Image: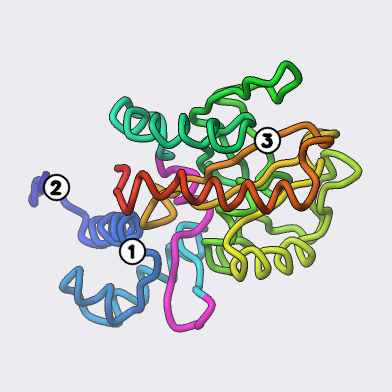
Amino acid sequence: MEPTRDYTIASLDTGLRMMRLFLTHDTLTVSQAAGLLSVGRSTAHRVLSTLEGRGFATRDSSGRGYAAGPELVRLGRPAGFGTTVRERLAAVLEDAVRRTGETVQSAALIGDRIVITDGRESPHPVRVVLETCRTYPVHATSGGKLLLSRMTTEQVRALCPQEELSAITPNTLTSRSALLAELDGIRARGYALSRGESVPGVNTVAVPLAGASWRDRLALMASSPVDRGDDEALVRRAEELLCSAALLGAVRLQ
């Protein structure tokens, strides 16, 4: 919907349109932003610098472009809660619990936490209980680390501004440096692990589920008691989860 021009504040309008671009673009250079908004490069640079100063944008790893900042990520509505999305994910979750035999969950990012959007419980008598809508610190879960690995280093630093991270269990990563190093490994192998980092005695593995940008990305996780979740089992489940996630295909969830 176009604003009423008699009451439009031009600079505010440009800033709002710039913020909207980050909902569909992972990164933007000054030239790209200027072209998309039909404004001069100097205007685009000033707007992006202002957004960066307020936490709505952050520099990408190249130093030449910008990505969504932590304030904008917090405002973005996470994927996975709408009826249509849940219907699309149902077959994936049911296939994943059949393949792994363990409790499976889909997770979305909200600021520096993840939220469980849906899932299916394991048929085992002793199992991880599904708690839809529960949130966890992003650095302490396999799903959170998987979603962080698909962001830029600068976005991760913005979401986790302190070097010291909270210890949820004795196994939780407690430094941002260690987290960033682990994210590099996750990017290389394509899945993330958590060995009792958010809940003692529970090991989880996560793979990418869907999403073309930070706003609509989801992680698919399988969680089990530690006695059924050694390293070999977790790697095998990662492969099984990837097969299940492929059922969704490259479908945009929003």
Few, some or many residues within 10 Å of mark 1 (<14, 14–19, 20+): some
Front in this rendered view, residue 167 or 252: 252
Q: Which mark is residue 140?
A: none
Q: Which mark is residue 223?
A: 3
Front in this rendered view, residue 7 or 224: 224
What amino acid is found at the position of numbered circle 2 in the picture? Tyr
Which residue is rendered at x = 32% and y = 54% of the image?
Answer: 250
The residue that disc 1 covers is: 25
Quarter the N terminus occupies: top left
Which residue is rendered at x = 29% and y = 60% of the image?
Answer: 21
Q: Does 107 appear above or below 188?
A: above
Q: Is residue 123 left or right of residue 168?
A: left
Quarter the C terminus occupies: top left
Which quadrant of the structure image shows residue 31?
bottom left
What is the spatial separation of the Cα atoms under label 1 and label 3, in whole angstroms? 32 Å
Magenta stretch: includes residue 63 = yes
What amino acid is found at the position of numbered circle 3 in the picture? Ser
The residue that disc 2 covers is: 7
Q: Which residues are magenta?
A: 61-77
What is the spatial separation of the Cα atoms under label 3 and label 2, in whole angstroms? 53 Å
